[in-house]
Image (tube, grey):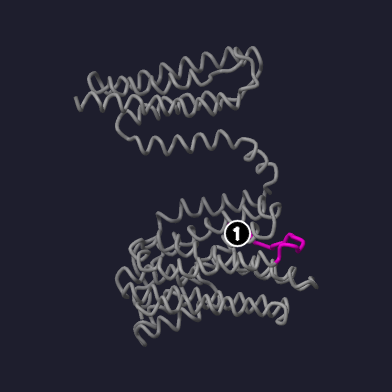
Amino acid sequence: MELQLQIIWDTLSALGIGLLIGIERGWSGRKEDEGDRVAGIRTFSLVGLLGGVWAELSHFTSDWVLPIIFLSLTALIITSYIIDTKEDNDLGITTEIALLLTFSLGAWAALGYHLYALVVTVIVITLLSLKPVLHRWLEEIEVKEIYAGIKLLVISVILLPLLPNQGYGPWQSLNPYWIWWMVVLISGLSFVGYILIKYLGRRHGTLLTAITGGLASSTAVTLSLAQLARQQEKLNSHYLFMAGVLVASSIMYVRVAIEVLIVNPGLLYPLWIPLTIMLVSTGIAAIWLWKKSENSPDKQPDIALKNPLQFFTAIQFGLLLAVILVLAAAMQQWYGDEGIYLLALLSGLMDVDAITLSLSRMAMAKISSDVAVSGIILSVISNALVKAGLFIFWAGFQKNKVLIWIIFGISIAGFISLLPFL
């Protein structure tokens, strides 16, 4: 009885996958005549079910059954494509590829990998539905951005496997493989923010710009907002830009959490407490400032960001990370935990990413989790205070002094949450 229920569940999963993709394809082609569509909701549902049924039958027949059926379906789709192309000269093959994917995902689900198949199905539906957005991005993207991305990807894919995965230098603190892998990680995170700020942020207001820009560089967002605030006479306009600085800082906390999760997930359990306290406090303060600025004109900040996928930018971060790694090892050897705290405070003046990655790695063997968590939060506090200082220095103290008190209060809350770890 249990086997029968499992077969029914697997088959229904395959049918559900075909139905989901078929709904998207049917919706996108809803304006076409019934006979003009290559495949609609019924065809996709049947193809998903076909994959599921033959995946179940392969348990009782031969492993070669699925490949044979897949090739037969491919031949049928190719034949249909050739006939359709002769009639309407439409060379697009998106629907045909989606049909093959539907069969494969249906079979995958029926073989017991329901979650994986569903995740890929969601990705497929997303890509299919984002056609207008993706095409618009392709029209706007610049050649230099494509070349920069290709260069870094090639260097990463080719160079990374060749780098030695062992420690070198003072205290064996320099691991070429790990350092370059972190360069790729940070460049990728920053590139997401770069793309969002370039193609989305500037069209949707100051606060959204601060959110997207915070992924790439919260410091760049702060300086850009400070320039705008400096041009404003009304106080409520300054409230808006101060809220933007806080929003960009809140994204920094999320970015730190992502970096720790990737490098040392075990460190996230103690770290989430101070990060959450600071994130929530920052969010409340940002909302309060935004409310006070409701009547102010929402001017778009023009944030000057460099493409983070440029090779020179990646090398700069790699060198900074290497220096921080050596200094962290040296300070820990010479001055113990206090040396780590001092380095974290000083590193936060320039960059949070490098010290976050360094301490997350050191927490695996060389320092305790409490020391790593304390160092990361101290660097975050230091960086937040520096950004507040930069904004006030550039935009003027008198109208923006409330920001330094807010950041100072948030920093105190973060420091108090650290006391159990110190």
**How far across and how far down the image is residue 194, in percent?**
61, 56
Q: Residue at x 72, y 82 (%)?
A: 398
Q: Magenta region: which residues?
A: 293-309
Q: Residue at x 32, y 75 (%)?
A: 367
> Badge 1 is on which residue?
211
Number of numbered discs present?
1
Look at the numbered disc 1 and give the secondary structure of its residue: helix
- Please tell me in which quadrant of the rendered image residue 316 appears: bottom right
Is residue 221 magenta-colored? no
Instruction: Give the farthest residue toward the left.
Output: 1
Is residue 14 rendered to the left or right of residue 390? left
Q: Residue at x 48, y 58 (%)?
A: 185
Is residue 304 magenta-colored? yes
Is residue 18 rendered to the left or right of residue 128? left
Between 99 and 4, the residue placed more toward the observer is 4
Sort mark 1 into few (<14), some (14-19) or many (20+) by Cα contacts within 10 Å.
Answer: many
Amino acid at pointer 1? Ile
**How far across and how far down the image is residue 118, in percent?**
41, 36
Q: Main secondary structure of the magenta part?
A: loop
Between 393 and 411, the residue placed more toward the observer is 411
**How far across and how far down the image is residue 406, in percent?**
58, 76
Instruction: Give the farthest residue toward the bottom.
Output: 335
